[in-house]
Image (tube, rainbow, N blue to C red):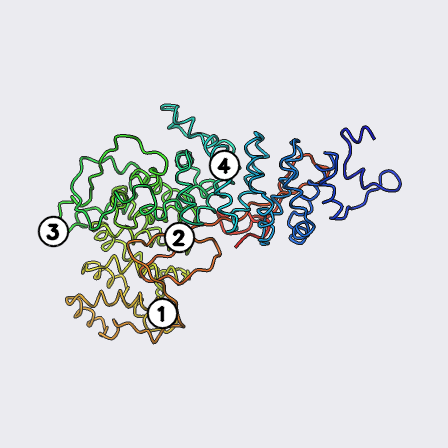
Amino acid sequence: MTMERGSMASLDSTLRKGPPGTWRQPELPEVIAMLNFRLDPVKINAAAFLQHLTFKNDKVKSEVRRLKGIPSLVSLLDHPTKDVHHSACGALKNISFGRDQENKIAIKNCDGVPALVRLLRKTHDQDLTDTITGTLWNLSSHDSVKMEIVDHALHALADEVVVPHSGWERASHGGEESCKPRHLEWETALTNTAGCLRNVSSERSEARRKLRECTGLVDSLMYVVQSQINRKDVDNKLVENCVCLLRNLSYHVHREVPGCERYAETAPVNQGPVPANKGGCFGSRKGKDEWFSKAGKKDGDDGSGDVVDIPKRTTPAKGYELLYQPEVVRVYTSLLRESKNPSVLEAAAGAIQNLCAGRWTYGRYIRATVRLEKGLPMIAELLAHGNDRVVRAMSGALRNLSIDNRNCQLLGLHAVPHLVANLPGGQSQSGRTLSEETVVSVLSTLTEVLGNSVDAAKTLRTSQGIERLVLINKDGKRSEREVRGAGQVLQLVWAHKELRKPLEKDGWKKTDFMVNLSATNGPSTRANGTYEDSTMPLLDRGEKRDMIPLNDLGPEAYSTLDQRERRHTLDETTDTLPRGVYGGRKGSLPLLDSYDG
């Protein structure tokens, strides 16, 4: 008995009955009762056995909740023994994973988030930190837990994980060495933490404000992304979570950052020349130069519209200021050029879209910098991507970039064929079926790019755009929003009197350019919005959305999937990741179970 009380007590000995060597499977109520046993080895093995039982088993998770096992597991997070922490936190991580939202709520209701934070602050164990941050990531996918995490866990996650393990602090004092690619420490914990904050950043403006103002957080995120770009490793989950978080923090940045009223511009500002720019540091691919050649300029255009006067800062930008500095454009254009992960591409374009929204000084700088960095052709080419959400993000970014007159001119000359290729009909879609939201976004972008430009309208005509627009307008299979969008573009084309005769020679009639709402396929709700504030609405993956009006853009901000579970068996001293087939689309979190949303 002394030996067992000291070190050997376990489920094995507690449940052994009959001849030596026999063992029976414990009932779930017995296992939960053992969480409160006086001997630590029994507690450790009971929690570990629960982690094993709850792996990929929603029924057992619900039973653990019903039998009040979650409060016992949470209480073990404050136990003085390290092995107890590992087992209890591993079980909570599994229980918090999956579609059953009640499990997440139960963990929240027994103060699970503050308990996880206390454990995070006192542990220096990497595996345990991985498990704690993975549990918080799982919990963060439920709306009712998001602000709980922001209020109780944000600073601990920044102080204990993101800032110290991103390499940013070390690099900021390392001189030239800081420019060299660095291996990121504790990558799993960083990925989990960025995924958790990515989720909570979609909650509300108050959450975004607290994240932006958290000391060192934005600096570290930017450093992580830049260092991964330098290492040419931009398709992993860490980069995806960081870029999606940066995109969410860029949402409504022109309205929400302190002192934003100083940067408001009520009318477009003339752009004057600027001294020689160092732009083009990434070079350009064949075909991009024609966007900026003499052929792309009107008679009398000296090209001065291609530059913008960006005053030099007297002090380095830091914190949330880094979100909207013109230099951030190079980060996002690098990702657009190098990444093959659709989620990274969507987030990078979404961040550009958000930063270019509204009439504000830094929005004007960003629009011009994207042009100088040869970002316009890059984004236009990505309209041919096979992923619907990527196409929508690129379209939305181009629309907000077109607020700049020079951008609008260039897009009208060169991007219209890329936009037209995404409209229903024709042979160039290669079997792609784009969603209504994406088609509406493309139509809205065409409306802005065409504007009053007869040259853009001519390009639309020669790109077989009229055929596709009329098809949308009349075939009776499209929604009201699509028909209205197509009608708006057609009316812009018909408004150019010099084009009417050529159009009539092509066989078109005036009635072809009128909106035909009688041909819509069912009703469509519409919301009110304004063009200037058309940024990425913050919604979670899978959340129902209102229909998007023609003058808004629509792609939602990311909410990530749950972190996968981990199996724990009684004869193992450490957790092992189960072998399994990775599910989901390329670049998504490995799915070994169901996911939220």
Mark in the foreground, 1 or 2: 1
Q: Quadrant of the N terminus?
A: top right
Cα distance, mark 2 to mark 4?
30 Å
Q: Amino acid at mark 1?
A: Glu
Upstream in sequence: badge 2 or badge 4: 4
Upstream in sequence: badge 2 or badge 3: 3
Cα distance, mark 3 to mark 4?
57 Å
Circle 1 residue: 480
Circle 3 residue: 299
Q: Nearer the viewer, residue 451 or 477?
A: 451
Secondary structure type for disc 1: helix
Upstream in sequence: badge 1 or badge 2: 2
Q: Nearer the viewer, residue 173 or 407?
A: 173
Do the numbered discs 2 and 4 sit on residues whose CB atoms are within 8 Å?
Answer: no
Label 2 CA crowd tier, 10 Å (few <14, some 14–19, many 20+): many
**Marker disc for residue 181:** none
Q: Is residue 207 left or right of residue 117?
A: left
Circle 4 residue: 157
Cα distance, mark 2 to mark 3?
36 Å
Residue found at x 78% / y 34%: 9
